[in-house]
Image (spheres, helix red, strand yellow):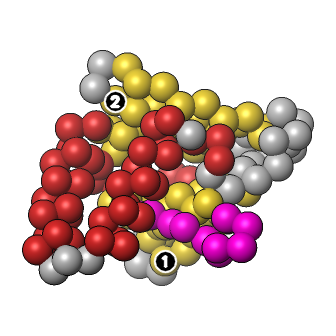
């Protein structure tokens, strides 16, 4: 089984945010980064990643951000953010890359990158349960 992540030092880091990217042919990359405070749980294993987002917390953030974007008439960013958040729930398998940003005990930052672009190597699943959006990626 292919290893998704080197989690040998996972106990000594603190995840600070998660970025989801979708490469769109001819348009480039669409990306959204979500602060770790919106996650109820992050489970990282060699062959599996489970990201559990608190839907209420994320919806509150989305409402506040939408309000600010509309006040500035930033319709492009408004559309981008809302489409990316909808993609997580309804079209998760289209995400090509997940980056988990972290800081270690020495306050040095880094990132784990999970390449999800090859459906022959990874399986992805998105489900809603008890107010949580559960995103799962595992190697085949």
Which residue is pictured at 30% across the width and 19% down the height?
A: 130
Q: Secondary structure at mark 2?
A: strand
- Residue 81 lies, in percent from the top left, at 37, 61
Asked where in the image residue 6 lies, by quadrant, the reply is: bottom right
In this view, the residue in front, 115 or 87, is 87
The residues colored magenta run: 24-33
113 left or right of 15? right
Distance of mark 2 from mark 1, alpha carbons? 28 Å
Quick check: 74 above or below 55? below
Quarter the C terminus occupies: top right
In front here: 52 or 23? 23
Mark 1 surroundings: few (<14), some (14-19) or many (≥20) residues within 10 A? some
Query: Mark 2 or 1, which is nearer the eye?
Result: 2
The residue sitting at 62% across, 51% down in the picture is 95
Quadrant occupied by the N terminus: top right
Give how far across and how far down residue 51 sits, in percent. Answer: 48, 41
Relative placement, left or right, of 99 versus 96 is left
Q: Is residue 25 magenta?
A: yes
Residue 8 at x, y = what percent? Answer: 67, 53
Q: Which residue is mark 2?
A: 132
- Number of residue marks: 2
**34 or 6, which is in the foreground?**
34
> Where in the figure is residue 61, as x and y percent of width and height?
20, 55
Q: Give the mark, 2 or 1, whose residue is nearer the N terminus.
A: 1
- Residue displayed at 67% across by 65% down: 23
Residue 46 visible within the image: yes
Left of 11 or right of it: where is 57? left
């Amino acid at each position: 089984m292919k290893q998704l992540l080197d989690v040998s030092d996972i106990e000594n880091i603190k995840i600070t945010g998660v970025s989801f990217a979708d490469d769109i042919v001819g348009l480039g990359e669409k990306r959204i980064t979500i602060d770790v405070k919106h996650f109820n749980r992050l489970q990282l294993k060699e062959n599996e990643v489970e990201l559990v987002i608190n839907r209420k917390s994320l919806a509150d953030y989305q409402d506040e951000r939408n309000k600010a974007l509309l006040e500035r008439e930033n319709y492009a960013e408004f559309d981008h953010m809302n489409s990316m958040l909808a993609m997580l729930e309804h079209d998760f398998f289209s995400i090509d890359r997940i980056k988990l940003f972290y800081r270690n005990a020495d306050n040095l930052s880094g990132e784990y990158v999970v390449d999800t672009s090859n459906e022959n190597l990874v399986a992805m699943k998105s489900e809603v349960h008890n107010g949580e959006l559960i995103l799962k990626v595992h190697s085949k």
